[in-house]
Amino acid sequence: MLTDLTIKNVAIIDNLHISLKTGLTVLTGETGAGKSIIIDAVGLIMGGRASSDLIRSGEDEAVVEALFDISCLPQIKELLAAADFDNNDELLIKRSLTRSGKNRIFINGSMATLALLSDLTPRLINIYGQHDSQTLLKPENHLRLLDAYAGLAGMRDVFSRQFSQLSELRTQIAGLEEAQRDAERRQDLLSYQSQEIMAAALRDGEEEELSEQRRVLANAERLGGGSGEAFERLYGGDGAILGQLRRLSTSIAELAVLDSSLQGSATALEAAYLQLEDAAITLRDYASRIEADPATLQNIDDRLDLISRLKKKYGSSVANILTYQAQINTELEQLQGGQQSRQELELEREQMEQELRQRGAELTAERTTAAARLKQALETEAHQLAMKGAVIEPTLEALSEPRAYGYERVEFLFSPNPGEIARPLARIASGGELSRLMLAIKQVLPEGDVPTLVFDEVDTGIGGATSELVGRKLKNVAVRQQVLCITHLPQVAVCATQQLRVEKLIQNGRTATRIIELDQQGRTNEIARMLAGEKITDSALAHASEMLAAGRQI
């Protein structure tokens, strides 16, 4: 609730402090005393437009401060904590306006943004009247009012959770669809790569073998000529090495018969002869079979070229290429499994959509029934509040696609006079009518959701028994919520638990506004003034006392 309001240098107010209590507080006083300026100041606290025109003449800065008790408002504390502000049991909001345009907002002593202020204060206080209506002028609030009246908050929350889950699932499926398109492109690429590698029929170590074969074939003429020449020099013609070695070996063997110490040399020469003979035969056979084969060489070159191209694309060796092939085959299997996962999610989505449609249909049916009851209840209240013949029509408009709150939007249409077409409230309702409509709504709703309500012009155009009824209804609302009301009617004022008199005076040649909390005698005098005018008679005082006594009994 709002406990304190301080206003400095706003219009004709130089320095004003108000301490507020629970229940119903009324602000009374002569026309032009500054009551509406107080509402303007509260509007600034709620994030209203800041204009330098509001700054008191001759001053450079205007300041409005509001202190709230939030000890029983955990949601406000959570909002403050989320924004990194102190969140104890009190909330101090300060807004300053300067002629230079450097306006500032402070929350619990720390600078804050207008966006945060505009999000925070409508949860704390609402104004109904000529200045603003945070609820009735915004059609998005009408559905919440209907649901509150019908007790559908639980059903709506369930629907909202299911809608959120469905939205998340749709987002997931959309992501999978995009991923699947990427996967299909990836799958095409991997399939091509796998087939290309498979068609090559590579085997580990093949490149080395082919490289060796290529070297032989590329040098076949040199290898054949060289090995043949070597054979001829070893074995072939006259003067061949093996012939000379044979004669030498025989000669040394004969000498070894004469001297056994030469036996080792004879044996070594014999062994050398046999080894060279084997080498000569091998060279002869090699030379006989080696020959140039351009076709085979070309095939090997083509094969090595294929392997080289695959290495550039898939790996630095045949072994790495084969490893990559195994990896992409595994990925292809996983991509095919992803398609199956999406099909399962699609089935889940269809089931959730069916459940949401059923839940939405139930919610729509309940709202349709409740709208008829709410229409009757609001019109009954409105007729009692001097709006005879007024029509209030909560209309349901079907949506093509569901939203977080259901399959329809709700807007209250209003016709103040019989025979007129009901139109949106924001377009035709006056400030006083909005105040009384909100008062009517507060009578039929089960409980209040905003701690503090401010009613301005609620008594416009009414009097007599109707004004007494307005007072009773305001006091009834004040049982659940703190209510501030500006009134000119004594029948309303006597129902208050706290009465503040706003008055204008001249100080040092300048006009100023002050506010006084009235005691019992002060309230009697003020009620008498409201009854009789400037000249207060004994009968007016007696009547005021009677009215106050009756007001306490309501």
Image (cartoon, grey):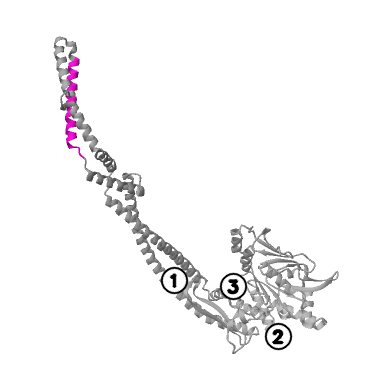
Q: Residue at x 60, y 72 (%)?
A: 448
Asked if residue 323 can be seen in this view, the reply is: no
Residue 284 spot, x, y in % from top left: 17, 32
What is the number of the mark on residue 464? 2
Q: Are marks 1 and 2 in contact (CB under 8 Å)?
A: no
Q: Residue at x 19, y 18 (%)?
A: 268
Kind of residue at badge 1: Leu
Closer to the eye: label 1 or 2: 1
Q: Classify 513 as above or below 77.
A: below
Secondary structure at badge 2 equals helix
Mainly helix, strand or loop, the magenta region?
helix
What is the number of the mark on residue 447? 3
Kind of residue at badge 3: Glu
Secondary structure at badge 1 equals helix
Q: Of all residues shown, which one is farthest toward the bottom?
A: 419
Between 29 and 317, the one lying in front of the other is 317
Q: Quadrant of residue 335?
A: bottom left
Alpha carbon distance from label 3 to label 1: 29 Å
Magenta residues span 264-291
Residue 345 spot, x, y in % from top left: 39, 64
